[in-house]
Image: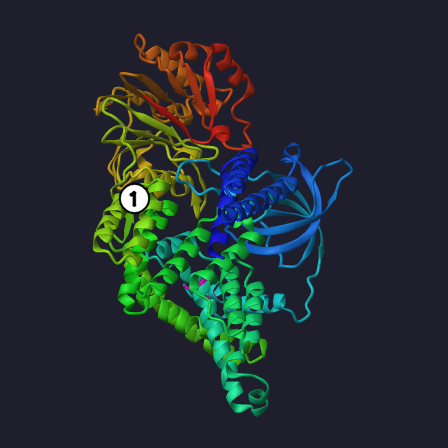
């Protein structure tokens, strides 16, 4: 089973990262060689790899069939369907997933239905209920996310959720009432409303919903940061730990029933009592809490263990895990694209390895230590960070949350289902008190200096070496091999991304939506030019793109932040950046926006050198500081191998002023970041003649409402002979000089 699981997962991964033709050709050659050499075992392993390859191929093909037609993006459509769930109330909108069952249009659209879409409903006073059937006028577009190194891949996450389009509701046309009969659906809503009403002012209300119902939508970005920095994010997921505790409780309950009911003693052997109820409970709880992948894995594991116990067989931990992983990959092959899948499988596999090697239960401190060291390669590869306080935080949080808080919530839910409101209220308040104590402790610890160790994301090969080294340490009894394994493991922490050479510079124009952010790196210094837009109170380019990219690159300090002007699409992520990493100084045309920080006004004539690279501010002068777009800081970065001109949002007036102010070839640059994102109000012919760019980068957003870059401007650059790059099409653009 273990070999079969590994082969199937290998087939899934190969199908995603390689072309289908390459996979089939390689498998065919290897299968032929195995038959000629009479290696039957190898042949059947290749068959399983082939099955995994085809399973993912069919899943991707199915997703492609249901994909939203690109020609119908941003057009009004009338759709009828059902609210599936994930209803999240945001500041000025409601977000929910919706299954489109019918498309009301006279035009032919090649779109396979039903299809799942993610909708935003702006300024709607009441959120739709799960299960409601609605007829809506919507505008949809294909899924799109940021394509920057180290940044969360939103488009891939949507694909794993089988969401084929995103959009917003323009108008409600028809609404049907949701069924009100007794069902798990209404019980879920009843308990959600019960928590919202009795714990409205509780700081841990979102955690109560997550623990009881698997509903993590109310957890804010700040709360997620605390959980991640303390290594306790797994506590708010319905995972194997929670479900195992609950299953053990159900099993113990039926054991007690067997002791006091003679009829059960005559019909059933004691070891078999509770097996079927526990399996049914696990499956029912999986559907009740939203069918998450982590819950599915735990459900399969519990069911396999119960069935083995029914047949009086003892399974090894590796067999149980392999069965669960194989079952998940067959049902949901796109799960391999989620980092949570690999992290959860790694954690459970590590526990199983320690258990079978005799290291597991001898000491809880030893267990936590091995778990911390064992998950380090996976955490660094997936997230680029490790919580150094996770050992301590989990030591007190797991017993309180999983051992006390969660059972109280579940019994409270049962009390509400049995109409024992007084009991449900009492237990809910007790659970709220316990979780509040835990949360208070986590907040304090999360803000301890050095709680999180950030590291540039290592190569996958180094992570694999570190994992094999850990397995050697745990299983090998030879001291020499263990010492070698320790040194191999240490290479993971010593790894650093190659730095920029002396006299060279690397610029990365990030994809931040409709906005601009550029990271400039020399050998020992870092400059950030603009920080992208702020989309909402909880979401901005600084925290979503800029900080993850800096951490991916292993950058722990920004020497200079240049904010060209006050527009949101350039200054929106500045606060997140200033809170996230130390910044030595801020250079901007709007210094009043940065009170309390080491700020100075950017003016023509300012210049400095870093590691053989020259930086010079060309604009504005003091006379033109208060002209909005035309007061943007213009910065030229030059090395002996070329130069780049960063222009902010200057328009034709500022371009003509620059031409008058410049002396000789001062403006000439091989690379140009297009002024004002390629607007028709910028990039005049005279300015292009003065700069003479060979390559131009347009920093624009996918399906932006301004239709940047303007087609006439793109044509002008082509006529001038410049090669054009666009962040909405190419993602982050890296420039090395």
Q: Position of residue 240 (x, y in %)?
A: 45, 64
Give SS at disc 1: loop
Q: Position of residue 84 (x, y in %)?
A: 62, 55
The residue that appears at 24% across and 29% down in the rendered structure is: 523
Mark 1 — residue? 455
Quadrant of residue 550 in the image? Answer: top left
Q: Is residue 472 above or below residue 707?
A: below
Magenta segment: 204-208
- Left or right: where does residue 338 sit relative to residue 150? right
Would you say residue 73 is visible in this rendering? Answer: yes
Is residue 62 magenta-colored?
no
The residue that appears at 53% across and 15% down in the rendered structure is: 715
Quadrant of residue 556 in the image? Answer: top left
Q: Nearer the viewer, residue 353 or 260?
A: 353
Q: Nearer the viewer, residue 667 or 452?
A: 452
Would you say residue 92 is visible in this rendering? Answer: no
Q: Is residue 264 above or below residue 450?
A: below
- Left or right: where does residue 581 sit relative to residue 243? left
Is residue 205 magenta-colored?
yes
């Amino acid at each position: 089973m273990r070999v079969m699981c590994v082969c199937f997962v290998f087939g899934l991964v190969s199908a995603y990262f390689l072309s289908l033709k390459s996979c089939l050709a390689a498998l065919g050659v290897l299968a032929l060689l195995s038959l000629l050499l009479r290696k039957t075992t190898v042949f059947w392993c290749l068959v399983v790899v082939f099955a995994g390859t085809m399973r993912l191929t069919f899943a991707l093909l199915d997703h492609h069939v249901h994909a939203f037609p690109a020609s119908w993006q941003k057009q009004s459509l009338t759709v009828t369907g059902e609210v599936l769930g994930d209803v999240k109330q945001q500041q000025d909108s409601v977000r929910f997933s919706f299954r489109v069952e019918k498309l009301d249009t006279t035009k032919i659209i090649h779109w396979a239905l039903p299809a799942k879409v993610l909708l935003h409903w702006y300024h709607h006073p009441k959120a739709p209920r799960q299960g409601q059937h609605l007829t809506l006028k919507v505008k949809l577009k294909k899924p799109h996310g940021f394509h920057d190194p180290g940044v969360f891949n939103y488009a891939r996450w949507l694909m794993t959720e089988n969401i084929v389009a995103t959009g917003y509701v323009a108008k409600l046309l028809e609404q049907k009432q949701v069924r009100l009969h007794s069902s798990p659906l209404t019980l879920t809503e009843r308990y959600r409303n019960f928590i919202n009403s009795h714990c409205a002012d509780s700081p841990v209300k979102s955690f109560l919903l997550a623990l009881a119902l698997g509903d993590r939508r109310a957890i804010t970005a700040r709360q997620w940061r605390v959980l991640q920095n303390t290594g306790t994010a797994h506590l708010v997921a319905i995972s194997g730990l929670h479900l195992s505790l609950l299953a053990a409780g159900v099993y113990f309950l039926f054991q007690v029933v067997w002791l006091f009911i003679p009829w059960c003693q005559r019909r059933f052997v004691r070891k078999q009592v509770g097996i079927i109820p526990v399996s049914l409970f696990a499956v029912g709880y999986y559907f009740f809490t939203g069918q998450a992948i982590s819950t599915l894995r735990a459900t399969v594991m519990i069911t396999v263990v119960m069935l083995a116990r029914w047949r009086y067989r003892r399974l090894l931990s590796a067999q149980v895990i392999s069965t669960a992983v194989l079952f998940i990959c067959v049902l949901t092959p796109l799960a391999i694209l989620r980092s949570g899948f690999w992290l959860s499988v790694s954690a459970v596999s590590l526990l199983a390895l320690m258990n079978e090697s005799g290291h597991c239960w001898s000491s809880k401190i030893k267990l936590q230590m091995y778990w911390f060291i064992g998950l380090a390669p996976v955490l660094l590869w997936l997230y680029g960070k490790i919580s150094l306080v996770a050992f301590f935080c989990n030591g007190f949080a797991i017993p309180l949350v999983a051992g006390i808080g969660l059972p109280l919530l579940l019994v409270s839910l049962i009390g509400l289902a049995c109409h024992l409101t007084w009991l449900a209220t009492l237990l809910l308040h007790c659970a709220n008190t316990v979780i509040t104590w835990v949360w208070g402790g986590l907040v304090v610890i999360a803000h301890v200096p050095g709680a999180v160790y950030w590291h540039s994301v290592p190569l996958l090969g180094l992570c694999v070496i570190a994992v094999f080294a850990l397995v050697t340490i745990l299983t090998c009894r030879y001291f020499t091999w263990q010492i070698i394994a320790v040194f191999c493991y240490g290479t993971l922490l010593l790894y650093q991304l190659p730095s920029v050479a002396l006299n060279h510079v690397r610029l990365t124009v990030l994809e931040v939506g409709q906005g601009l952010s550029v990271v400039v790196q020399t050998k020992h210094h870092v400059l950030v030019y603009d920080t992208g837009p702020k989309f909402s109170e909880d979401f901005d380019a600084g925290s979503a793109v800029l900080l993850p990219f800096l951490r991916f690159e292993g950058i722990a300090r920004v020497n200079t932040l240049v904010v060209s002007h006050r527009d949101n699409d350039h200054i929106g992520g500045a606060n997140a950046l200033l809170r996230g990493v130390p910044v030595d100084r801020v250079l901007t045309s709007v210094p009043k926006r940065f009170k309390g920080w080491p700020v100075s006004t950017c003016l023509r004539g300012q210049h400095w050198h870093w590691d053989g690279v020259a930086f010079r501010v060309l604009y504005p002068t003091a006379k033109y500081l208060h002209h909005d777009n035309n007061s943007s800081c213009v910065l030229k970065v030059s090395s002996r191998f070329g130069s780049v001109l960063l222009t902010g949002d200057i328009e034709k007036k500022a371009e003509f002023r620059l031409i008058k102010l410049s002396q000789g070839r001062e403006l000439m640059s091989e690379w140009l970041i297009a002024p004002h994102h390629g607007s028709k109000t910028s990039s005049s012919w005279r300015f292009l003649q003065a700069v003479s760019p060979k390559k131009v980068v347009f920093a624009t957003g996918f399906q932006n409402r301004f239709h940047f870059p303007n087609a006439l401007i793109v044509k002008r650059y082509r006529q001038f002979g410049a090669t054009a790059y666009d962040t909405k099409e190419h993602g982050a653009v890296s420039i090395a000089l």
